Amino acid sequence: MSKKRLGFIIKSLPYKTEASKLAVTHAISSQTAEIYLEDGDSVEPVICFIGDGVFNCIKGQQSMKHYGITSIEQHIKNALLLDLKVMICSEDLEKFRIKKESVIMDASEMGGETLAIIASYTEIQKEMNAVDHLLFF
């Protein structure tokens, strides 16, 4: 039995690029890899928003209304609904004056129980050091 830990580090802004949405999509889809693994093996992704990437976590995105596409907010909620670990850098929230109340913390309206974690960069760095594969977006 082995566990492969994947780290998805999101530093990109939520606009003018698909990088952050693709990162969350890849993290969610990594769960489907388990059908190809031996019994008992697993994949455990962690999504970390740092730097400009914390802007992806702001509530109330309107991309479906304005552009007809799902928002990164919906992707983050889907990740939380699937019990993926989502971490948001507290120092970067503070630097950009983003309040905790303005950040996506759960998917409770969809029945999700997992909460996003607002963590220090030191805690996020520990998480990065513990993964088998690290991907930057």
Image: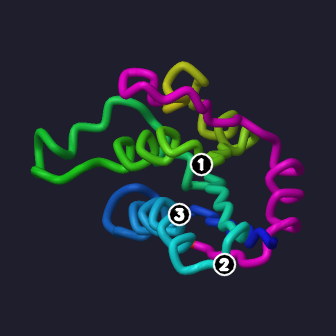
| Apparent side of residue 78 relative to residue 7 in the rendered image (left or right) | left
Distance between mark 2 and mark 3 Cα atoms: 14 Å
Residue at left offset 64%, top offset 64%: 9
Residue 48 horizontal side relative to residue 4, left or right? left
Residue that carries the numbered disc 2 in the rendered image = 38
As shown in the figure, which amino acid type bears the numbered disc 1?
A: Leu
Q: Earlier in the sequence, mark 1 or mark 3?
A: 3
Disc 2 element? loop
Towards the viewer: 74 or 40: 40
Q: Quadrant of the N terminus?
A: bottom right
Residue carrying label 3: 31
Range covered by the magenta-colored residues: 107-136
User: Label 3: few (<14), some or many (≥20) within 10 Å?
Assistant: some
Q: Amino acid at mark 3?
A: Gln
Q: In this orientation, which residue lies closer to the viewer: 42 or 40?
A: 40
Q: How many marks?
A: 3
- Determine which residue is flagged by label 1: 84
Whether residue 110 is in magenta: the answer is yes
Q: Are marks 1 and 3 in contact (CB under 8 Å)?
A: yes
